[in-house]
Image: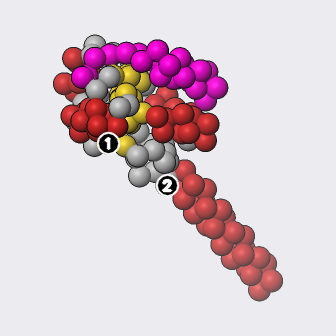
Amino acid sequence: MKQASVWGVVTVLALVVAVVVLNRGAGSSSQPGGGAVALPWERDLSSALARAGSENKIVMVDFYTDWCGWCRRFDQNTLSDSNVQRALERVVSVRLNAEKDGREAAERFRVDEYPTILFLDARGEEVGRISGYFEPGPFLAEIEDIIRKA
């Protein structure tokens, strides 16, 4: 009987460790939108535009919502891709919740689906837009084209 209860304790401990490890990986996000993304996000559009002007770059605005599953998937699968992150070193990134801090900007740029990735010049004029979820390869092709034309 004692041997069975020892194995029961070991099994329970193994399950607890597995759950902790899995949750740590899934919940390690410090970014809004749910993904663990290592991009240097600006906190607001005006500071992103100012930085873009001083660095001669364009701005990438990631519009998301808290309820958007495709936004979380975009963060986890696409923005976390090393090739995508390397390409995005050439832009100033800002992330805006279209229903909270980014509501005015979302209305101004007529954002009505999520995720929407907007590219702006340093004056705040739109130079490109990617709407909806994209896997890393197709997203990379789109941003390369937008950056080249900007």
Residue 109, position as x, y percentages in the image: 27, 16
Q: Secondary structure at mark 1?
A: strand
Residue 105, position as x, y percentages in the image: 23, 24
Local packing at callout 1 (Cα closer than 10 Å; few below 14, some 14-19, many 20+) is some
Q: Is residue 132 among what the camera can see?
A: no
Whether residue 76 sits left or right of residue 3 in the image: it is left
Residue 74, position as x, y percentages in the image: 52, 32
Please name which of the two marks, 2 or 1, marks the residue nearer to the observer: 1
Whether residue 2 sits left or right of residue 82 in the image: it is right
Label of residue 96 in the image? none
Above or below residue 108? Residue 89 is below
Residue 108, position as x, y percentages in the image: 21, 17
Per the model, the C-alpha gap separating discs 2 and 1 is 20 Å
Give the amino acid at mark 2. Ser
Q: Is residue 139 magenta?
A: yes
Residues at badges 2 and 1 in contact (C-beta under 8 Å)? no
Q: Is residue 46 magenta?
A: no
The N terminus, quarter of image: bottom right
